[in-house]
Amino acid sequence: MANHAVLRSSLVCLALVVVVVGICTQSFRKMMVTYLVGVVGIGGVLLPDWAYFDRDFSRWGTPVSVEERVSANATAERSGLARFKRYPMRLAAYATIYGFALYNWWGFVSS
């Protein structure tokens, strides 16, 4: 990952959420579940090799070529949201998976 600051700030925010959950619920188990759900969620967004997955689905079975890696690095150097490509299937998958996880987490924490 080129920018470690995003990962660091995400983990700091997660730590704050875990502390708030611990203070509000007085439950170590709920704090640990919040931490695990948060780490898996952050890892699912920040850690994948996007140069590999930002290709056509049919090419996922082949290694990334040097040209694709160079173009992915040039894209990653752009700032802001301009560097992210919009993929409707990825968005739908993330919304479904993370929505389900947050729904179950909230049900567990609020009980």
Image (cartoon, rainbow, N blue to C red):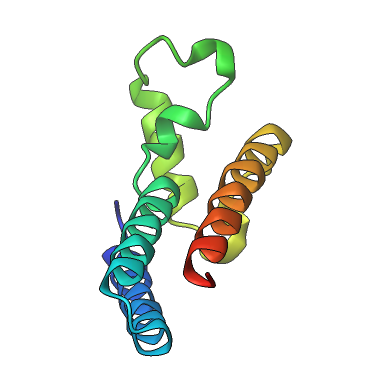
Q: How many marks?
A: 0
Query: Which residue is situated farthest in the bottom direction here?
Result: 23
State whether residue 27 is above or below residue 54: below
Question: In the image as oriented, which residue stretches furthest toward the right?
Answer: 88
Tell whether 76 sits left or right of 30: right
Residue 52 rendering spot, x and y as whole percentages: 41, 28
Residue 29 position, x and y percent, is: 29, 66
Point 62% across, 57% down: residue: 82
Q: Position of residue 110 (x, y in %)?
A: 54, 72
Name the foreground residue: 93 vs 66: 93
Instruction: Relative to 48, say whether 41 is above or below.
Output: below
Which of the 4 quarters of the picture holds residue 37? Answer: bottom left
Residue 35 vs 37, above or below: the answer is below
Along the line of sight, the residue nearer the viewer: 77 or 42: 42
Residue at the image point whose x is 43% and y is 56% from the top: 77
Q: Is residue 8 left or right of residue 64?
A: left
Q: Position of residue 12 (x, y in %)?
A: 31, 78
- Note whether 49 is above or below 105 in the view shown: above
Residue at 34% across / 15% down in the picture? Answer: 63
Dividing the picture into quadrants, the one containing residue 66 is top left
Identified at 49% across, 62% down, the residue is 108
Q: Nearer the viewer, residue 44 or 31?
A: 31
